[in-house]
Image: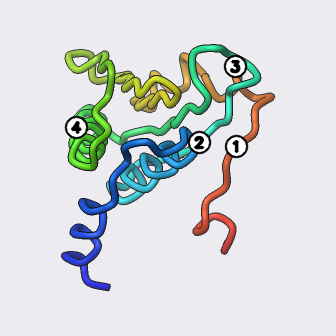
Amino acid sequence: MTDLEIKENEMETSLEGVSSEELANAIYDILDNKKAKDLKVLHVEQKTVIADYFVICTGNSSTQVKSLADEVEYKTTLRGKAPTNFEGKGNISWIVIDYDNVIVHIFSREAREFYNLDKLYSGTTEMKHAEEEAE
């Protein structure tokens, strides 16, 4: 499949009415395609009432952190699922994109180490993805 066919397919697949797991996986794919680092989807429903899933990743620079966030917002909105809130656009060390039951955390390396959500939610299930299972 060519890059153009993949892009056309992404635009055609609506995210309206999908489950929170499907949305989290779609966001994972968007971030993975943009080369986000240390990408994880955590099922946090049993640990917090604010969301079912956290999608967490790291950008290599403030430019990449902003670019990752912009790409998630753009691609999901294009597919019919705009975020309900977007925090940290001016910060560039930690951007949070809220989709109600899915919350996306995009960190700089330093902010990820400092806030350490991975440890805070260590008792949760990390969702596996096809490319991870193949390794």
- Nearest to N terminus: mark 1 or mark 4: 4
Looking at the rendering, which quadrant does residue 71 occupy? Answer: top left
Q: Of residues 25 and 63, which is closer to you in this image?
A: 25
Whether the residues at callouts 3 and 1 have beta carbons within 8 Å, the answer is no
Residue 18, percent across and down? 47, 45
Q: Label 2 to label 3, Cα distance in Å?
A: 14 Å
Mark 3 or mark 1, which has the lower sequence index? 3
Is 90 located above or below residue 18 in the figure? above
Is the residue marked by circle 1 packed among few (<14), some (14-19), or many (20+) residues within 10 Å? some
Q: Cα distance, mark 3 to mark 1?
A: 13 Å
The mark lying in front, picked from 2 and 3, is 2
Residue picked out by circle 2 = 41
Q: Which mark is residue 91?
A: none
Type of the residue with mark 4: Asp
Rate crowding at label 3 as few (under 14), some (14 to 19) or many (20 or more) other CA atoms within 10 Å: few
For the residue marked with disc 2, what is the amino acid?
Val
Q: Earlier in the sequence, mark 2 or mark 3?
A: 2
Q: Which residue is mark 1?
A: 126
In the structure shown, which secondary structural element does the residue marked by tag 2 occupy? strand
Q: Which is nearer the eye, 17 or 92? A: 17
At a point 57% along the width and 23% down the height, the residue shown is 51
Residue 70 bears which disc, if any?
4
Measured in 3D between alpha carbons, the distance from the residue under mark 3 to the one under mark 4, in whole angstroms, is: 26 Å
* Image quarter of the C terminus: bottom right
Query: How far separated are the C-alphas under marks 1 and 2?
Result: 6 Å
Residue 9's quadrant in the figure? Answer: bottom left
